[in-house]
Amino acid sequence: MKSIHMNANAGQTVSIKFIPKEEGEFVFFCTVPGHKEAGMVGKFIVKE
């Protein structure tokens, strides 16, 4: 899967829409230095 980069300000909600090409668990995280290490991570699960 390719990378998706999005910008969001504090308190802002940002959405994306996509069609997954494979099942699996995919991690996402904040790329601001230190934020990923502080716990700004998550994952989404794609199932058939």
Image: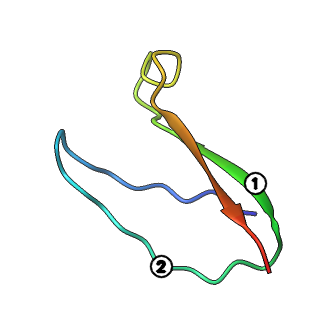
At horizontal 45% and vertical 36% (from top left) the residue drawn is 30
Q: Tell me, yes or no, whether the two marked residues, 1 and 2, touch with CB atoms within 8 Å.
A: no
- Measured as percent of width and height from the top left, residue 32 is found at 40, 28
24 on left or right of 29 = right
Query: Quarter-wise, where is residue 22 in the image?
Result: bottom right
36 on left or right of 46 = left
Q: In this figure, which residue is indicated by the disc labeled 2?
A: 17
Residue 39 sits above or below residue 26 on the image: above
Label 1 and label 2: CA atoms lie apart by 17 Å
- Measured as percent of width and height from the top left, residue 18 is found at 56, 80
Q: In this figure, which residue is indicated by the disc labeled 1?
A: 25
Badge 2: how crowded within 10 Å, few (<14), some, or many (20+)? few
At horizontal 40% and vertical 56% (from top left) the residue drawn is 6
**Earlier-in-chain disc, 1 versus 2:** 2
Amino acid type at image mark 2: Lys
Residue 21 sits above or below residue 31 on the image: below
Residue 10 sits above or below residue 37 on the image: below
At horizontal 43% and vertical 20% (from top left) the residue drawn is 33
13 on left or right of 24 = left
Query: Quarter-wise, where is residue 40 in the image?
Result: top left
- Measured as percent of width and height from the top left, residue 8 is found at 27, 49
Q: Secondary structure at mark 1?
A: strand
Query: Quarter-wise, where is residue 44 in the image?
Result: bottom right
Q: Secondary structure at mark 2?
A: loop
38 on left or right of 48 = left
Numbered disc in front, either 1 or 2: 1
The disc placed on residue 13 is none
